[in-house]
């Protein structure tokens, strides 16, 4: 059994947006197997293809664009503060190493800085720098590795 495929130029029953009735239309454009655009044989108007039996739900809706969930207006990455709080939650402030230029730091160490407060070493950069995440942001500070 051969399934006849529709193609542009074929006649199809569709709901005309202008005549507001189900009428014969000529297929204007197709995407794959799907009819997307038709021309009304009665009024000659071209419009998107609407199947003859339209679901009541969609026909009631105004012809506005798709109303999906509102776009979140947040930064993609979690803020420094959130990261900092998460790291602080898993570290013991009593174990903080007082920061000094010759403090021996390693990644993951908790540091207490006189100006920036508590921070966690996120990376050590040879020969003598440590990237430390403080409440107010990441700082690159001198240290002894
Ligand atoms: Zn029409």
Image (tube, helix red, strand yellow):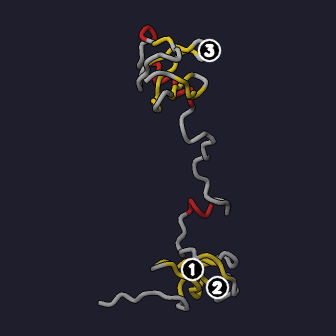
Quick check: marks 1 and 3 in contact, CB under 8 Å? Answer: no
Q: Which residue is identified by label 2?
A: 40
Q: Which residue is identified by label 1?
A: 14
The residue carrying mark 1 has its beta carbon less than 8 Å from ligand 1:
no
Q: Residue furthest top?
A: 94
Query: Which of the 4 quarters of the picture holds residue 56?
Result: bottom right
In front: mark 2 or mark 3?
3
The residue carrying mark 2 has its beta carbon less than 8 Å from ligand 1:
yes
Cα separation, mark 1 vs mark 3, equals: 73 Å
Q: Residues within 10 Å of mark 2 (few under 14, many from 20)?
A: many
Q: Position of residue 103 (x, y in %)?
A: 47, 16
Q: Is residue 54 left or right of residue 87?
A: right
Quick check: marks 2 and 3 in contact, CB under 8 Å? Answer: no
Q: Quadrant of the C terminus?
A: top left
* Numbered disc 2: secondary structure: strand
Q: Which residue is identified by label 3?
A: 115
Q: Position of residue 51 (x, y in %)?
A: 53, 74
Residue at image coords 55%, 25%: 141
């Amino acid at each position: 059994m051969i399934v006849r495929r529709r193609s542009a130029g074929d006649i199809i029953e569709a709901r005309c947006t202008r005549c507001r009735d189900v009428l014969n239309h000529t297929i204007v454009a197709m995407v794959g197997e799907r009819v997307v655009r038709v021309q009304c044989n009665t009024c000659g108007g071209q419009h998107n293809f609407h199947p003859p039996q339209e679901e009541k739900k969609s026909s009631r809706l105004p012809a506005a664009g798709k109303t999906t969930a509102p776009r979140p207006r947040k930064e993609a990455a979690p803020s420094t503060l959130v990261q900092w709080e998460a790291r602080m939650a898993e570290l013991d402030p009593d174990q903080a190493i007082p920061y000094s230029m010759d403090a021996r730091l390693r990644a993951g160490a908790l540091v207490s800085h006189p100006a920036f407060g508590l921070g966690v070493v996120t990376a050590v950069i040879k020969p003598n720098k440590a990237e430390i995440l403080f409440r107010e942001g990441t700082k690159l500070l001198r240290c002894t590795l």
